Amino acid sequence: MATEIRTEQKKERTLIEFFGEVPDPRKKHNLKHKLIDILIIGVCGVIAGCNNFEEIEEWALMKEEFLRKFLELRNGIPSHDTINRVFSIIDPRIFFQCFMSWISEVRVMLGEKEISIDGKTLCGSRSTKFGKRSALHLVSAWSSQMQISLGQVRTHEKSNEITAIPELLNLLMIEGCIITIDAMGCQKEIAALIIEKKANYVLALKKNHGDFHEEVETYFNDVEKSNFKNEDCEIFKTIEKDHGRIEKRTVVITNNINWITQKPLWKSLQCIVMVIAERKEKDKKTIEKRYYITSLNKNAEKIAHIIRSHWSIENQLHWHLDVNFAEDYSRLRTKNNAENFSSLRKIALALLKQESNKPESFANDTERRLNKKKSIRCKRLRALLDEKYLLKIIGLSTF
């Protein structure tokens, strides 16, 4: 396995074994470098703080002796042009599928899971040359419990998320999961597919649904005017205080929805939900109302948690990719290299987040301080400087 998480399987597979299944698209004669060597150098380099292929080559040249402990490197370290060329031609679906195979081994330990789906545009991948290529837009699935990306599908335009989301859902094993999607994915066909795959959904409902949205909004406005005394509704409230900001959240849910005109069109629709978010910071006060539909039974506290967890895809995935991995500054745009490098970032982020095992006791104060909870940036720095730590992250600590 690629991490030290234990599963019920008897034999744990290493990261090298997983990525050894990626087919080599290069011509078979006169190959100077093994594909697996290039892939593992890419993964390790990004974990150790590299944000482009030139940095990966520079890091690998400095760490050649270390890399030879587990890679063949029969012709030394490949150039950044070679690494770039390889990542531009390997199939991004198969490359990320190998990572997902590792994920599937980890996930056997988990029970009910929440999976958030959202899109992100790689701004730097836009090009005004070569046919004015538009920026790459990726739709990703994120496990809020495991804090790792579970899969991704590319689409050239944000509007095509509607077709990309079903494609992504069909790649994932979602039975028993709860799928959360923002308004773009609030489609009858997507809801039906989620139910068909034996999962449940919580979908954001916005004004682009016309009469449906208006019916739900009118109902909850009446409930609010009655001071939430409607006996068909269940309410859950939370108050959060952070750095001078106070946020009050009220979640109202009802399963009395037979009056909704479009109810028969939405597969397994059970409840409608309103979330009132009231924020107060200094003298500024804002109130926002959002509406959701779900196939889950009425449980305001559970729904409140699920809706709140959805935003971890922004806070814990997209934020890290932009801030710690400089994704928005990447200028990769040739063939598949932008998509595959995005996969490298997500793989590195997943491995860094999974690295949390601590010894039961520490030999000295330095060891204790090194094993304190660290940010992703600090973990990348330590992986750059500490070869044993990098081996631990990729599951090769026995070397």
Image (cartoon, rainbow, N blue to C red):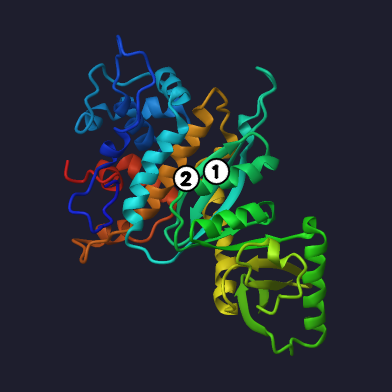
Residue type, numbered disc 1: Glu
Q: Is residue 55 above or below residue 10?
A: above
Residue topped by disc 2: 171
Q: Quadrant of residue 260?
A: bottom right
Q: Residue at x 57, y 75 (%)?
A: 297
Q: Is residue 396 above or below residue 207?
A: above
Instruction: Please indicate, yes or no, whether residue 243 appears anywhere in the rendered image.
Output: yes
Q: CB of mark 1 within 8 Å of CB of mark 2?
A: yes
Residue type, numbered disc 2: Leu
Q: Quadrant of residue 153?
A: top right
Instruction: Please indicate, yes or no, whether residue 355 appears anywhere in the rendered image.
Output: no
Q: Is 339 positioned to the left or the right of 90 in the image?
A: right
Mark 1–mark 2 Cα distance, whole angstroms, equals 7 Å
Task: Judge by depth and name the residue closer to the eye, 140 or 239.
Answer: 140
Q: Is 277 positioned to the left or the right of 54 in the image?
A: right
User: Which quarter shows the C terminus?
Assistant: top left
Residue topped by disc 1: 167
Coordinates of residue 300 in the picture (x, y in percent): 60, 78
Q: How many numbered marks does the figure carry?
A: 2
Coordinates of residue 68 in the picture (x, y in percent): 21, 28
